[in-house]
Image (spheres, grey):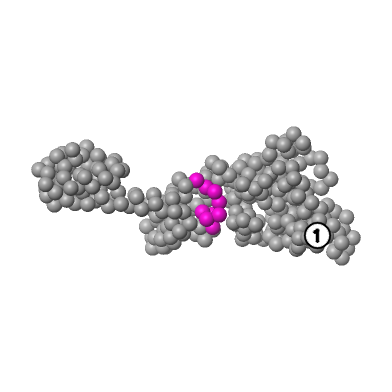
């Protein structure tokens, strides 16, 4: 299992109990003796009355003691065989649960399949009954089967475990929204594990950098180290930005020392210039120029 899947499972494990106020907890499912047939996780419903007011799909859990969850992250297969394998794992858990139950259990194991979106082939093969934004009951089915399309879910705190399965622009939107809501450790895990755009990675870095309190500065350094270590492209961009900023500062310092006053439009030219070689050339000219305009020719 790759990093995105592990991250999604950790989010379910860490956040489910908090979000539902202890009404629902997460548990790693037992291995089924079928040459290792194992689902991604189980939602164990402890207090169904506490989740009635949460956003869909949570209220659907009230009628169950246990729900098998299958996570399909961006890049995972969502074709017919992939879904059939998920159904096989559900059926294996169904058999296991029926055999190990101390009492005669005649129920049906529910399946919640979480994915970025609903594949086109599923819409043509099955009827999808909307029970809330991004949440669909798959019919016909002899057991409770929900498809949860993360890209279509609303941005709600109680839906964070499902929202981590978003992809593309929807993932970027989620990343911007969730950044101030979650812990540093979780945010770092998301940056490392999900396929958000490089632009949004940089935005998260600068967002953290805006904090002025000591704790915020510590977060900035930690996130900076993590991002630079895991993203060489971002590292290169930040290094280039730093060198350009230093070149602007050095140029202004020389002009000030030589008492060559900058007009507002000349200062704006320096600020707008993002070419290191141009700034360095201006710096050299500023050493001998008689006016700021001459230095910036």
Q: Nearer the viewer, residue 257 or 109?
A: 257
Query: In the structure shown, which secondary structural element does the residue marked by tag 1 occupy?
Result: loop
Residue pictured at 73% horizontal, 56% vertical: 39
Image quadrant where residue 81 sits: top right
Most extreme residue toward the right, as rendered?
104
Find disc 1 in the rendering and name its residue: 34
Q: Position of 252 compared to 240: left or right?
A: left
| Camera sees residue 18 | no
Q: Horizontal and vertical percent for residue 119?
A: 68, 39
Q: Indicate yes or no whether the magenta region holds residue 88.
A: no
- Residue 121 vs 156, above or below: the answer is above
Residue pictured at 81% horizontal, 43% vertical:
141
User: Is 297 left, or right, of 14 in this rendering?
Assistant: left
To which quarter of the image does residue 275 belong? top left
Q: Are there few (<14), some (14-19), or many (20+) residues within 10 Å of tag 1?
A: few
Residue occupying the far left of the picture = 290
Residue 36 at x, y percent in the picture: 76, 60
User: Can you give x and y, in whole percent of width and height, for residue 251 in the image?
Assistant: 21, 49
What residue is drawn where x is 30% and y is 52%?
243
Q: Is residue 190 magenta?
A: yes
Using the rendered image of the protein, determine whether residue 235 is visible from the camera's viewpoint: yes
Task: Name the outermost residue toward the top.
Answer: 124
**Which residue lies at the image location 47% right of the left edge and 47% below the top edge?**
198
The spot of residue 238 in percent (x, y) is 38, 51
Q: Quadrant of the N terminus?
A: bottom right
The image quadrant where one finds the C terminus is top left
Magenta segment: 189-197
């Amino acid at each position: 299992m790759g990093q995105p899947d592990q991250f999604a499972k950790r989010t379910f494990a860490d956040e489910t109990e908090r979000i539902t106020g202890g009404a629902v907890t997460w548990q790693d499912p037992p291995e089924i003796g079928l040459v290792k047939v194992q689902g991604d996780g189980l939602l164990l419903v402890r207090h169904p009355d506490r989740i009635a007011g949460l956003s869909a799909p949570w209220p659907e859990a009230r009628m169950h003691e246990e729900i098998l969850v299958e996570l399909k992250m961006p890049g995972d297969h969502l074709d017919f065989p992939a879904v059939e394998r998920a159904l096989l794992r559900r059926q294996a858990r169904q058999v296991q649960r029926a055999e190990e139950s101390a009492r005669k259990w005649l129920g049906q194991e529910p399946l919640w399949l979480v994915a970025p979106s609903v594949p086109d082939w599923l819409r043509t093969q099955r009827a999808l009954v909307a029970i809330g934004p991004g949440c669909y009951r798959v019919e016909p089915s002899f057991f409770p089967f929900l498809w949860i399309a993360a890209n279509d879910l609303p941005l709600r705190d109680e839906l964070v475990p499902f929202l981590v399965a978003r992809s593309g622009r929807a993932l970027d939107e989620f990343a911007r929204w969730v950044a101030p809501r979650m812990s540093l450790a979780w945010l770092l895990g998301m940056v490392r594990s999900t396929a958000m755009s490089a632009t949004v990675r940089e935005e998260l870095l600068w967002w953290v950098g805006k904090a002025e309190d000591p704790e915020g500065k510590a977060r900035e350094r930690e996130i900076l180290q993590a991002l630079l270590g895991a993203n060489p492209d971002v590292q290169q961009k930040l290094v280039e930005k730093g060198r350009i900023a230093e070149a602007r500062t050095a140029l202004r310092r020389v002009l000030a020392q030589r008492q060559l006053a900058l007009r507002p439009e000349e200062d704006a030219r320096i600020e707008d210039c993002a070419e290191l070689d141009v700034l360095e050339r201006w710096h050299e000219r500023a050493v001998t120029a008689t006016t700021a305009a001459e230095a910036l020719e």
